Image (cartoon, rainbow, N blue to C red):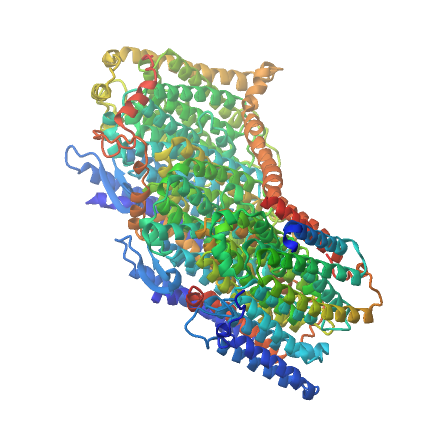
Amino acid sequence: MFLTFITFLPFLGALCLVFMRKENASAIKQTALAFAVADFLLSLLLWTNFDNTTEKMQFGLNVSWIEAWGINYHIGLDGISLLLYVMTTFLTMICVIASWDVKKHIREYMIAMLALSTGMLGVFIALDLFMFYVFWEFQLVPMYIIVGVWGGPRRIYASIKFFLFTAVGSLLMLVAILWIYFHIQQTTGVATADILYITDHLDVSLDASKWLWMAFFLAFAIKVPMFPFHTWLPDAHVEAPTAGSVILAGVLLKMGTYGFLRFNLPFFPQASFEFVPMVAWLSIIGIIYGALVAMVQEDLKKLVAYSSVSHLGFIMLGIFALNPYGIQGALIQNINHGISTSALFLLVGIVYDRRHTRLISEFGGLAKIMPKYTVCFMIVALSSIGLPGMNGFVGEFLVLLGIFQVNGLWAACATSGVILAACYILWMFQRVMFLELKNPKNMDMKDMNTREMITIAPLIILIFWIGLYPNTFMKTFDASVNHLVSKVNPDNFRPHQEKHKDSHGEHAQLITPTEMASLNQKLQMPKKF
Amino acid sequence: MEPILAPESIDLIALAPVLVLSIFAMLILVLDLWGGRNKSLLVFTSLVGLLMTAISAFAKYPIPAYSFNDSYVVDHLSLFFICIFTISSALAILLSVEYNEREGIRAGEYYALILFCTVGMILLASSTDMIMIFLGIEIVSICLYVLAGIRRNDHRSNEAALKYFLLGAFATGFLLYGMTLVYGSTGSTNLFKIAEFVKNPSAQSNPLLMMGLVLLVIGFGFKVASVPFHMWAPDVYQGAPTPVTAFMAVGPKAAAFAAFFRVFADTFPEMSSSWEMLLSIIAVLSMFVGNLGAIMQTNIKRMLAFSSISHAGYILMAVIAKNSLGSSSLLFYMLSYAFMTFGVFGIVIILGRKGEENLEIKNYSGLAYKHPVIALSMTIFLLSLGGLPPFAGFVAKFYLFSAAIQEGLLTLVIIAVLNSAISFYYYLKVVVFMYMKEPEAEFKISLTPITLFVVFIGVVGTINLGIFPNSIITLASH
Amino acid sequence: MLLKLTCLVPLFPLIGSIINGFFGLKIGKNAVGLIACGSMALSFLTSILIYIGYLMLPEGQHIYEQVVWSWFGAGDFTVDFGFQIDPLTLVMMFVVTGVGLIIHVYAIGYMHEEYSFYRFFAYFNLFASAMLLLVMGNNFLLMFIGWEGVGCCSYFLIGYYFEKKSACDAGTKAFVVNRVGDFAFLLAVMYIFNVFGTIDFSDVMHAAPDKLIYGGEIVTIITMLLFVGATGKSAQIPLYTWLPDAMEGPTPVSALIHAATMVTAGVYMVVRCSALFNLSPMTMMVVAGIGGLTAIMAATIGMAQYDIKRVLAYSTVSQIGYMFLACGVGAYTAAIFHLVTHAFFKACLFLGSGSVIHGIHGEQDMRKMGGLKSHMPVTYWTFVVSTLAIAGIFPLSGFFSKDEILYHSLMDGNIIFWGMGVSAAMLTAFYMFRLVFMTFHGESRVDPSVHPHESPKVMTMPLVILAGLATIGGLLGIPLFHGWHILHNWLEPVLHFDLAHALHQSEHMLHEAGRHAPSWAHLLTPKEHNIWIEVLLMIFSLGVAITGIFGAYMFYIKRPDLPDKVIEGQWGYDLVQNKYYIDELYDESIVQPTVEGSKLLWKECDAKAIDGAVNGTANVIGWFSRQAQVFQSGFVRNYALFIVVGFISLLLVMF
Amino acid sequence: MLENTVPLSHYLMLSATLFVIGIVGVLIRRNVIVVFMSIEIMLNAVNISLIAFDNYMNLSGGQIFSFMVMCVAAAEVSVGLAIIIALHRNKPTVNLDEFNLLKW
């Protein structure tokens, strides 16, 4: 019940705003903020009361919704969704603050923002396919409106592209959902779309499960977005208002990765295993491709957008390493990307507000006039290139570690993304912050004001917190991940799984003595010189 | 030769709704003589009539009950449809009131015609005999011919009436011919007898019968405006007075689908192998042509016409599915479709000006910031038509697709979902204009209470069916 | 228990940098300087206390580990935020804190005119703290924090004058090139975890002989990767190009980061992982080879440079090459020994050059110096001492460390390595004295408007101290007689390696895997320490050094016209002076293609191909919809025609 | 009696022919009235086959049906003519092709 309340609280706020006069903007903003903050604090309560030791769903509620179809209003949080849930409320709050200066139709803006928040929260708590789909589609609309109304010059194109792109994917997912619904009905005789039930009872032939997997994959891959489906992202990001970009990068993309963890892996473990190479290569291409393309962007936001493509590639790689390192890394990387990239967008937004341009060539030498801004930007930039001691590193390392267990080559390719990340971020940073302050338009730019500080500061604190003591966050999903891994562990499907006593410490199962020796022998011993 | 109509086989109670409604219709004609210029009395009477009809529909119990040698049936399907009809007719009448004021339509028979049309629909939905079906269709059509042309001095209205009339009659020819052939090859006009007859395989391969089926498909296909028999729809929808358009898009269509379902899914299930293909082709064509046609439209009525064509395409899937889920999803779809459509057209009327003006989509620019509530409800209707949760349209589509999936029509469903993706484009186009463009001219919109009330009902229905569909689904799935 | 203080050592500079960073502007320069040096001094003292504490450890225990908190982990992978104290660490700690402290003091004087004085010291302290993390971490990842941390700080400090494009470029270049090394380092760490199931130094090093087969592929790959990481950080071939550019930073930075501490991190890491390197003869050979090669190449380049700091930079590269040469032949002690002495004299040299530059107002080109001896005596004498040290003149520190390396490269390595070493030694002597002569001797070429002056005390004192250290540093390792070599005995517990045991383990593993081990007997023949050979070598290399000095004397004092004659139209000279065109090569072959390729990828692949497909679909649909409209002609008979056509086609479908 | 002389197929042929004639008429003629006539022809073609069926299969439903058809046809005529007249008021022509305001 509590969970429901938190989830729909923002929507409540939106309703309140509907009845407020659009004239007194300040009241509207304050109300919105009040609701957002309240929501965030309450969600923190969830976190504090969360039991880390179990992978079971918590704060659950399961009441019948459409009896005729056996569809329930079933919600709950587990380790996989908890942090995403909290991050959603958190970023909503940040966004409300960050959009304080929106002048155009502020009331509609805040309504959309709060409604969006509810939609996203719903996605993370839904434990019924039907309900999940409802929220999944519902949150499109406010986002569409936000991009389309408060966006940049090509906003209409971008918003429609965003909407249709996502809709196509999710509609195919709908078909898959229906198919599963009836399949379950036939096999178990129970008409239900309950995710947990399906997770336990779904048994389909490998071929069928591959098709279903594909259907889900398309929906989520578009959302993530993975390499060939990513082109909506740069447009959406560039056109969206700052807060829009923040939500987009911070939460919406995570819904894709969340989908993989909640559906593809547990529903179709074997299919997932079969598809690992494809996903891995797509992600690797995404990592390198995104980084390379980001390097040559002239628009700051576009650069960050492509960098997200690259980062999300890491997350996908981690998920499909199918081992605890990878998946935990992916989960924490979810959060990290949410924090770092959101911060980057906020920072870009700050200069955009002052100069109404995002072209890198327009800037240069800002470090001289905006020291605070420079420091913040530097910290965030470093975190997004995964400097150890900051949040990015923890996730990236675990992900790479995980994928290394699967295939060293993949790990190597993916790691090269780390180098490229340094290239594009630092090059951009140099061109924007350093060098001489040539452009006269920049001469009188103000440094960050208090409100902007308030939006950035918490993110920076988190950057270091996660970087130095991530256990606070990682212990929440430990149990869930282990449970998940036990389901999808590739050893369950390996054609001939060699199980042998490991005489070489607990890690011989990673490199077996035989493998080791064979590897070892490949090399000719050089003569002692 | 046994007597065709044995007196005991006539069951007037079963026939109650038809009788009640006819009586009220005539009553209106009479009242109109003395009523003078004030039409509100007529409106009131017709509404009462519809209410009475709805009530009297439940007079017969237990159901299913048959009458006129099993040529008329009262069962769940027909009952539910009667409810849909009464609701839609009532909404249509409510929509008309102020519209007629504005357009200066003084004709009192307008309401009578709607009621008569409703009678026809009821017959159509509850008849199990081809003769009855024919009569029903004709009653409906003839009323609609007149209604379409009721704005006598308007060229477009006339033209719509003419086109509808000629093509309608033309299609009727095909329908009749089909019925004849079926009759000739089965020896009966009664659907039950026919069903019995076609049970034995030898009859199924009779070319006359098959030919007849094809012709029937054309006849019904025309009535539900499915491709390639849809050509009349855009023109007529555009030309006819807006309330009539809304009415046409819902009531008659629903009735035709009811008959369609009875004839094909109930009567010829054994022969599905032969007609499934036809209907699938028609369905797919309707979806594509409807959606593609709608994309380029600039006039909102015309766009909605095309969208209704595509919806016909979706609904055909229910007929193809021909299972219990199919029928119930048909019911649910039609009901939610009624709410959405009347809502949309209500708003079209609100924004329209005298003489069917101001119907271009670009006239909606910036509506959201002049009249947020109107714009919001419009958005809700459009998204619901597109099939976006949490609105009625989504649940309906979900229901429909699940029926099809249960029947294993996977490809059809996939095509359907891709089409609804396309449809989002033009539904969103309107939203784009309302929210993302600046107003072109000053809005002079007629916020008339009754029309607003209809819109309100539409919103409530759409959202309610979207979020709490359970009760209706339980009713529909009997 | 004094060792409990361990975690404070890196903490002090961190706090210092935070204070300076946030309040630097308000509290004023003196306070800033005080805080910076104070924090360094504190951590230096703490190191001493820790040293005492370490000595008090019970017999047999020679590693003290302190886990501050558990950093992160997943599944059975966990990594602690922990420090370890062992002889090697202690040596490095002293170098970092000690030399660091001195240079901090120097910097107060050198940077005094700067507006963003506080920013400099914030970075400087941060660097010190990161460097301490690097040497004190008890596992690879914690080392990696420091590893990247120092890289990051050097990025800041190189780009300290961020309005100069060259400075920014140099900074970015340094960071990116380092990243290439880190990339390899990361892979190595993952591989190590994959094999050992842990990444704690003590466990890995202890388990190495039992898990890895001598000369096997795994250990070779791992060590190769580690070494690539080292080349990145320590500016060895092929990743050395960033170091000379790094001279864009203020001179104290060059002294601390690019001479004394950071660039030697690679050496430290190799020594730290000696247990792994010992198992892979092939890697060892590569390490030695690269080291020697770098030593020579950098030296040759150094001969032809005119920027005083660049000369020193190349000399640094070359000296580090020495250290790797030592590692490569298994003389880890020698490597560390040279690392220490090099820290002393090279720091001194840099600071000296800084003092020169300071004295003639920022001029760095040696062709515009000369005859400064009289103007800045202290600088001159300290400079000369360090130069003698680096040239390897008895009895200065450089002499001992270098000769130990040369000796081992002959005994444990082969004649080629030795040859490399010796020739490098000669070149070093030559270009260092070229530097001295061009700067301090001869007639002044200084632009008359500036009046050279000696630097203030705060700058000269450090020079003196360092010069002193450079002189006596050799005492750490008197090679001739065993037991006199303090450093060797001190590091013994860390570097102890039992080849026989390792080979036995390998055989055991191979047998278990059903393979037979090759004969390793020849590896186990003991080598006796031959004093006379060593003495001989000493004398020889001394001679070599003197030759080099004499050459320099001939060229730049006796016959100043000679150099131009010699280099007259010498292609070799151009090659050397242009640093073998390596930078250009990299730029042409890697940087440009990447950028161009990316542009192509963006414009063609992303915009045209992928997005084209997306918009293409939309356009196709639009086209169809326009076609669909055409049929809607408005003529009744066309509509009727459609019905009929539909009828016929349906019939065709039906039958 | 007729049965033996003229087989059912002839009647069906006849009605089919008439039906097609009607269709063609609708397709090619421009005059509203004539088009309308052609439609009537189609309906009567149907009637013929109905009666024929009844006659040959000795049923009666068809006859009723044909009566219904006639009534309906009559009704349609009345409405149709009314529409045409209304049309003629606004636009004095019976050429069908001139009625295409509504298209595309």
Outermost residue toward the right in this view: D92
Residue D30 appearing in the image: yes
Q: Residue at x 46, y 77 (%)?
A: B59
Using the image, determine if residue B402 lies above or below residue C328.
Answer: below
Using the image, determine if residue B106 lies above or below residue A128.
Answer: below
Q: Residue at x 61, y 36 (%)?
A: C600
Q: Residue at x 70, y 74 (%)?
A: B444
Using the image, determine if residue C286 lies above or below residue B133.
Answer: above
- Does residue C561 appear to the left or right of A382 in the view shown? right
Q: Quadrant of residue C414?
A: top left
Taking depth in this image into account, of A292 and B292 the one nearest to the observer is B292
Q: Residue at x 79, y 70 (%)?
A: D85
Taking depth in this image into account, of C445 and C629 the one nearest to the observer is C629
Taking depth in this image into account, of D48 and B170 the one nearest to the observer is D48
Using the image, determine if residue C430 lies above or below residue A7.
Answer: above
Give the quadrant of the C terminus of chain A: top left
Outermost residue toward the front in this view: D1
Give the quadrant of the N terminus of chain A: bottom left
Outermost residue toward the left in this view: C59
User: How many marks can you see?
Assistant: 0
From the top left corner, tell me how far across and down residue A115 is, in percent. 48, 64
From the top left corner, tell me how far across and down residue C638 is, in percent. 74, 54
Residue A377 appearing in the image: no
From the top left corner, tell me how far across and down residue C645 is, in percent. 68, 49
From the top left corner, tell me how far across and down residue C341 is, in percent. 35, 28
